[in-house]
Amino acid sequence: MGPGIAFALCAAVLMGTATVLQAMGARRAAAAAPGAPCAGARTLVAALRCGPFVVGVGMDALGFAAELVALRSVALFVVEAALASSLAVTAVVAAVLLKVRLRAVEWTAVGAVCLGLAVLAVSGGRDGGGEGDLRLRLAILVTAVVLAVAGRVVERRATRSRAAVLGAVAGLAFGVVAVAVRMLIGFAPAELLADPATYAVVISGVTGFVFLVDALQTGSVTAATAAMVITESLWPALFGVVWLGDSTRHDRAPLAALGFVLSIAGALALARFGEAEQDAPPASAAGGAP
């Protein structure tokens, strides 16, 4: 296993664990103020005083840093599959810390994710080294802006399957982030300021976060997370192969495709863990207030 894949898996472990810790912190904050609303700035401020929540935020930041390293050295389809596997990490950690009972089908899904990642590790090649020309980076920036505006229009008009629709928009935006990071020319301040891909990362990062929060607050966590996993994973993987030169090792494309499908299918089966707090027991069962 190369260092790039190791960083991708590290990002998945950090982000998957962070989800559970943030859920624990949010529930403890809510338990400490039972008369307060369960959402909003007041709850966020209270959660920031809880150790698990703060640790979770820190792990998310470290996970994003690991993702950046992976995106610069591993094929996009490998990184996207690894990030989707963070739901398997969340499920297992939630079973231990939040006493969430996993069903047989969910343990099977965890196994499918692990098997899929193992197959990708032995078949996925290095990234193609392509960063795209200036026109392609400008196109990614335009895509980020159009997606933000279109997402806002959809947000206002969507009524049926709203959570899934907004989750899909969030996934598309996070996919733009992954592609734009891969296309960055360099990380020197002057290079970042002059690169259209930098602004695509910022715009789509904010867009994805806003629409994901809205999706999770609107309706089904499972629907929102499943839609996000699909849209975040599929198109960047295809983009990397077609436009950035990503490939598999020694013509192992069928094996890599199988690993990718197993990982994404397993993640979809675990979509209800897109917000671990959804399935958490009362605060006392999770350890009580600090």
Image: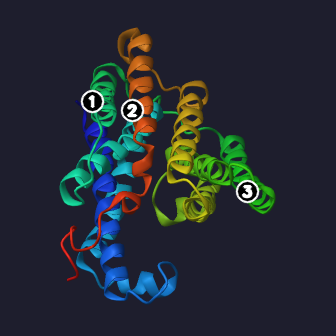
Q: Which mark is residue 111?
A: 1
1 and 2 marks in contact (CB < 8 Å): yes
Camera sees residue 45:
yes
Splitting the image into 4 quarters, where does residue 203 fall?
A: bottom right
In the visual, does 50 lie left or right of 216?
Answer: left
Which tag, 1 or 2, sits closer to the chain's start?
1
1 and 3 marks in contact (CB < 8 Å): no
Residue 96 at x, y percent in the picture: 18, 54
What residue is pinned by disc 3?
Answer: 151
Give the vertical position of 137 relative to 43 (above or below): above
Q: Which mark is residue 192?
A: none
Q: Residues within 10 Å of mark 1 (few under 14, many from 20)?
A: some
Q: Residue at x 72, y 42 (%)?
A: 135
Measure how far apart labels 1 and 3 are at the Cα level: 35 Å
Residue type at tag 1: Gly
Q: Residue at x 28, y 43 (%)?
A: 102
Camera-side mark, 2 or 3: 2
